[in-house]
Image (cartoon, rainbow, N blue to C red):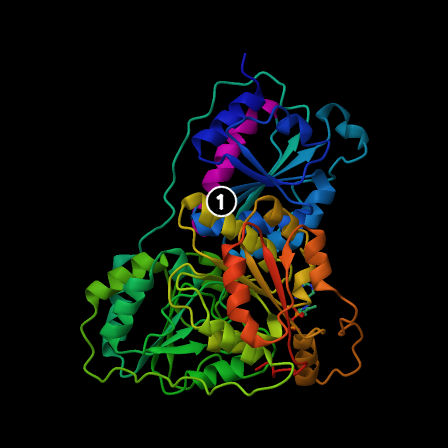
């Protein structure tokens, strides 16, 4: 007779979810026992890494991923990156073991108290099945919930004595749509406002990339002869950044953001929140005379926008439908922005000079994963993202995502046969939050290159302290860290890049290697302004 375990594995197989990211414990062992040969367990040494690796893998494959965590403590360890997966809108099925139902009343060691509350509010659905026999159908429901828009993580708490129970007949393997089209009448209203606009502007967010919407975004921008901004602090790039219409990333504060949009009468925001602010710099949300139109697949994101009119719909489908309704604008196309000045020389070099050197040796198909807080503006200016699905970072602001996410992305590149080179740029502070991911990358023999701009400080927090006039904050210096030794300890190759002349060869070698390579690059301690 089939057990709950047999039926669940059969379902996971049918859903194409034969990879399990996780870190095992006693409460997960009855699920993991006799692990089927056609499944793969991606072993993370810490749950934060397990969650972010699964997130990167899900984003790069375009399919939900499964993470298995160890009851309450493992879920707690994974929580920071669960927050990120929620903001990233990554479809993840997070399962966690639970103590035996037979003992739960007494709360034995490793019982999760109120397990469904623990990951809230950063999951779309959180559930512990009422009967063991409900586990497979709960996994099916979890899949359907995670994948449907707005996509995101879901959580199942699974008692360890459920797996050997006799199963009910297997649940039906269902499919769900992952995109929906906009209301045609409201779409026509948006198109009419855009057609009548004197000077429209597009603000595009990560959902355009998730919807494979670059070509249609370019077509709409060209049809409208409109400049294009990236929405503030984007987790993915939405538009070819070498395109003459592209202007850059909008600042993440009210007053300067509105200032950048001055002169525009219609602002079309697609696939991003309105707006993802960070420092509080009071001001209007929009310049005088501007009207905002907001396209999102998330009713909550639409509801919390402080200004503008909204239209629910998938970013790509909505842009395509708009294109059909828009006449060609009778105005000159925006002129291209100039190239940045060459960086200033220095010893050690500035992060800006490092990124200029990186841009010069950037592999054509390269995928950039980024967690370099204070130097982000320099990185994005020096290294324009020119291809879809090739820039990833966290939407949340929580550190410890980039390094493990890069491991998941590199694994997906290999699994899908795309084999694009993956380069992570991770600050020497950010490096340590999920550093154990290096071991998984080494075990998987992934040719991941990790460039670490080493400024030996939390520079962005110094910039924030400057902006907010909060002097004397402790804990902003990072002396005595040996990134190379740490990388070696986890089984990676490592080489300090002492001069930028060495970078092209070091990067090339890293991307050809049969294991990950960490490349710390000492950079100056200059603290860039936050805005
Ligand atoms: C989980 C988490 N802990 C703490 C912070 C606060 N924080 C934001 S940026 C930062 C420093 C990052 O340092 P580094 O990676 O060296 O980049 P730099 O600012 O020096 O460019 C810290 C500690 C955070 N965002 N997330």
**Residue 417 seen from this side:** yes
Residue at 45% over, 74% down: 360
Establish if 282 lies above or below 511.
Answer: below
**Location of residue 449 in the rendering, given as x and y in whole percent from the top left corner:** 55, 59
The magenta-colored residue range is 131-151
**Residue 252 seen from this side:** no
- Residue 450 versus residue 370: which sits nearer the camera? 450
> Within the displayed image, which quadrant is ligand 1 positioned in?
bottom right
Is 267 on the left or on the right of 133, as rendered?
Answer: left
- Residue 36 versus residue 136: which sits nearer the camera? 36
**Location of residue 36 in the rendering, given as x and y in whole percent from the top left corner:** 55, 26
Figure quadrant of residue 261: bottom left
Figure quadrant of residue 365: bottom left
Is 332 on the left or on the right of 291, as rendered?
Answer: left
- Residue 33 versus residue 104: which sits nearer the camera? 33
Figure quadrant of residue 452: bottom right
Q: Per the image, is 478 magenta?
A: no
Residue at 63% over, 19% down: 164
Q: Is mark 1 within 8 Å of ligand 1?
A: no
Q: Which residue is mark 1?
A: 146
**Location of residue 211 in the rendering, given as x and y in whole percent from the top left corner:** 37, 56
Residue at 40% over, 50% down: 418
Task: Report crowding for label 1: few under 14, some 14 to 19, many 20 or more residues within 10 A (C-alpha).
Answer: many
Split into 4 quadrants, where in the image is the C terminus?
A: bottom right
Is 480 on the left or on the right of 84, as rendered?
Answer: right
Q: Per the image, is 148 magenta?
A: yes
**What is the secondary structure assignment of the residue under circle 1?**
helix
């Amino acid at each position: 007779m089939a057990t709950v375990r047999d039926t669940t594995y059969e379902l996971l197989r049918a859903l194409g979810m034969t990879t399990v990211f996780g870190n095992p414990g006693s409460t997960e062992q009855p699920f993991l026992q006799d692990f089927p040969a056609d499944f793969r367990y991606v072993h993370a040494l810490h749950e934060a890494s397990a969650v972010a690796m699964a997130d990167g893998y899900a984003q790069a494959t375009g399919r939900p991923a499964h993470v298995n965590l160890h009851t309450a403590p493992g879920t707690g360890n994974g929580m920071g990156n669960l927050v990120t997966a929620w903001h990233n809108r990554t479809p993840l099925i997070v399962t966690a073991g639970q103590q035996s139902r037979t003992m739960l009343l007494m709360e034995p060691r490793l019982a999760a108290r109120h397990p469904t509350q623990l990951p809230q509010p950063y999951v779309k659905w959180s559930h512990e099945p009422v009967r063991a026999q409900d586990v497979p159908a709960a996994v099916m429901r979890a899949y359907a919930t995670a994948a449907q828009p707005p996509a995101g993580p879901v959580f199942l708490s699974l008692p360890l004595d459920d797996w050997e129970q006799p199963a009910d007949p297997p649940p039906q393997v269902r499919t769900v749509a992952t995109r929906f089209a906009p209301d045609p009448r409201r779409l026509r209203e948006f198109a009419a406002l855009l057609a009548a606009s004197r000077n429209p502007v597009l603000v595009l967010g990560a959902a355009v990339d998730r919807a494979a919407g670059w070509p249609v975004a370019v077509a709409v921008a060209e049809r409208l002869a409109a400049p294009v901004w990236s929405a503030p602090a984007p987790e993915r790039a939405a538009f070819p950044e070498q395109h003459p219409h592209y202007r850059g990333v909008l600042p993440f504060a009210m007053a300067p953001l509105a200032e950048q949009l001055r002169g525009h009468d219609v602002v079309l925001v697609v696939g991003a929140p309105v707006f993802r602010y960070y420092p509080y710099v009071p001001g209007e949300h929009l310049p005088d005379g501007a009207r905002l139109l907001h396209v999102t697949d998330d009713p909550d994101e639409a509801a919390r926008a402080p200004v503008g009119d909204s239209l629910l719909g998938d970013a790509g489908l909505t842009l395509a439908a708009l294109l059909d309704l828009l006449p060609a604008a009778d105005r000159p196309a925006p002129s291209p922005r100039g190239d940045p000045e060459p960086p200033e020389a220095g010893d050690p070099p500035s992060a800006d000079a490092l990124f200029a050197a990186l841009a010069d040796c950037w592999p054509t198909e390269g995928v950039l994963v980024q967690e370099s807080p204070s130097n982000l503006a320099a990185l994005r200016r020096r290294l324009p993202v020119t291809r879809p699905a090739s820039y990833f970072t966290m939407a949340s602001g929580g550190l410890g995502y980039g390094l493990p996410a890069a491991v998941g992305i590199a694994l997906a590149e290999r699994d899908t046969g795309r084999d694009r080179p993956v380069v992570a740029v991770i600050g020497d502070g950010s490096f340590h939050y999920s550093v154990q991911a290096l071991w998984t990358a080494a075990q998987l023999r992934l040719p991941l290159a990790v460039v670490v701009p080493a400024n030996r400080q939390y520079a962005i927090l110094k910039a924030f302290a400057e902006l907010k006039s909060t002097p004397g904050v402790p804990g902003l210096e990072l002396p005595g860290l040996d990134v190379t030794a740490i990388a070696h300890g986890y089984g990676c190759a490592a080489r300090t890049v002492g001069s930028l002349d060495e970078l092209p060869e070091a990067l090339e070698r890293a991307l050809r290697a049969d294991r990950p390579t960490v490349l710390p690059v000492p950079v100056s301690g200059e603290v860039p302004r936050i805005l």
